[in-house]
Image (cartoon, grey):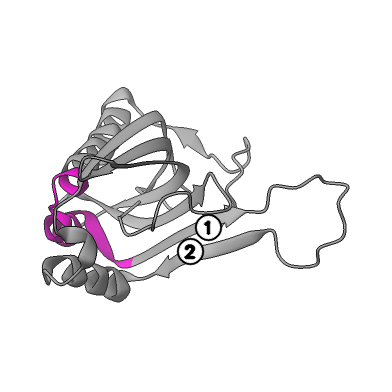
Amino acid sequence: MSNVTTAATVTAKVSEAVRTEGEAFLFLEARLLGTGQQRAWLNEMVHPEVTFKVSSRQLRSSKDKRYTQPDEVFHFDDDYGSLDKRVAQTESGLQWRSDPPETLLYIVSNVEVFEDERPGDLRVYSNVLMIRDRRVYESDQFHYRRDDVLRRSEDGALRLLSRSVVYGQRFVRGKNLLFFF
């Protein structure tokens, strides 16, 4: 999936009501994930056929040809089953980062909503700043771009069908990436 938006990758703008619905989906998701409700997020907002990828890119001069490795490195390449295991891990109480609990704040901005190639699916682009605080002295900030596809389920609710995240930094500046993007 390409992370570059061009006029050719966006098929049609949506109505104001649909755009608002797409934004509301992202804001609800941010609230659920930010308040530790990962199971509700997974069960109510994620499509069973989801693909969930998080990558970062090598930031080097375009003239620098010394390296032959790919520019893109994947941190996560999940499906519903692996997301379920990650949620179960947070629920186990055995994860070191859960005690004392951390607070997460997701700030979602620059939201654009379009019709996707498949009728009824929405393509949603957004930028996120996530702030994680734990204890008095631990604070991390992560910023990233997201390219999502939302599909309407049979009950009419939107569900996350695919997410492609481009993490803004090549190296993890915080202690870990143990959160949901």
- Work out whether residue 171 or residue 21 is closer to the camera in this orientation and state it: 171
Q: Nearer the viewer, residue 64 or 81?
A: 64
Residue drawn at x 21%, y 40% is 136
* Residue 35, position as x, y percentages in the image: 13, 45
SS for tag 1?
A: strand
Name the residue rendered at 53%, 57% in the picture.
55
Report the residue at 24% width, 36% height from top.
27
Considering only order in the chain, which callout, 1 or 2, is on the residue closer to the N terminus? 1
- Badge 2: residue crowd in 10 Å (few <14, some 14–19, many ≥20): some
Q: As shown in the figure, which amino acid type bears the numbered disc 1?
A: Ser
Vertical side of 44 occupied by 29: above or below: above
- Which residues, given as a range, are shown in magenta? 32-49
**Residue 100's x, y, as percent?**
14, 54
The disc label shown at residue 133, or none: none
Q: Nearer the viewer, residue 94 or 136?
A: 136
Badge 2 marks a residue whose secondary structure is: strand
Look at mark 2 in the image and give the residue it sits on.
75
Q: Which mark is residue 55?
A: 1
**Residue 44 belongs to magenta span:** yes
Q: Position of residue 59 (x, y in %)?
A: 69, 47
Vertical order, 24 against 92 (above or below): above
In the image, residue 124 lies in the stretch drawn in magenta: no
Residue at figure coordinates x 15%, y 72% from the top left: 94
Q: Quadrant of residue 22?
A: top left
Circles 2, 1 touching at the beta carbon (< 8 Å): yes
| Label 1: few (<14), some (14–19) or many (≥20) C-alpha neighbours in 10 Å | some
Kind of residue at badge 2: His
Residue 66: where, in percent of width, then height? 86, 61
